[in-house]
Amino acid sequence: MLKPAFWKLGRSLKLGLGLALLVGLAGAGEWASHRLPLGLPGAILGLLAYLALLAASPRIHAWTGEAAERLLKVLGILITPAAVGLATHTDAMASELGRIVIVLVVSTLATGLATWATFRLVTSWRR
C-alpha cells in the first residue's frame, strides 16, 4: 500500500500540522459557540468535531496523536487561567454555593455509578 506524502514529512512538521489542526478545531468550536444558539462551550464543540474526524478517518490520529499527547502533558498549565477566572467571581459563586455543592455531589455520584457500570459491563465481556 502506498503511503501519502504526509508520512514522509519530518517529525517536527507532523507535530506542527497536528497542533495546527487541533488549534483550528478549537477555534472553529469557539466560532460556532458564538454564532450558533447551541448553548455549548466552544471547547466542547471543537472536541466533538475532533471526535467526529477521528471516527470518520482513523488516519487523523496519525496527524494529531503526538500533538494531543503533548497538550495533555501540560494540561495543568492550560487549566490555570480558568481557576484564576473562578477566583475573580467569588462573590457570584458564594451566592450560589448551595447549588454548586449539590451539582458537585450529584455529578460525582453519577460519574462513580457510570464508572462502576462500565467496569461491570467490560468485565462481563471477558467471562
Image (cartoon, rainbow, N blue to C red):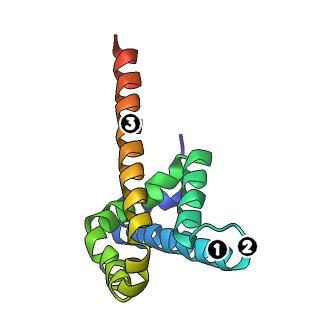
Please say if 22 is above or below 61. Answer: below
Mark 1 element type: helix
- Tell me the crowding category of disc 2: few under 14, some 14 to 19, or many 20 or more residues within 10 angstroms, Cα based: few
Q: Is residue 52 visible?
A: yes
Mark linked to residue 113? 3
Which of label 2 and label 3 is nearer to you? 3
Picture residue at 62% right of the left edge, 74% below the top: 28
Picture residue at 66% right of the left edge, 79% below the top: 34
Picture residue at 30% right of the left edge, 68% below the top: 75
Mark linked to residue 33? 1
Quadrant assignment, res 77: bottom left
What whole-number distance in Å separates the C-alpha atoms at marks 1 and 3?
A: 30 Å
The mark nearer the N terminus, 2 or 3, is 2
Q: Badges 1 and 3: C-beta atoms under 8 Å apart?
A: no
Amino acid type, mark 2: Leu
Amino acid type, mark 1: Ser
Quadrant assignment, res 94: bottom left
Q: Is residue 79 left or right of residue 53?
A: left
Amino acid type, mark 3: Leu
Picture residue at 49% right of the left edge, 74% below the top: 23
Q: Position of residue 43 (x, y in %)?
A: 52, 69
Q: Position of residue 78 (x, y in %)?
A: 33, 76
Q: Position of residue 31 (x, y in %)?
A: 64, 78
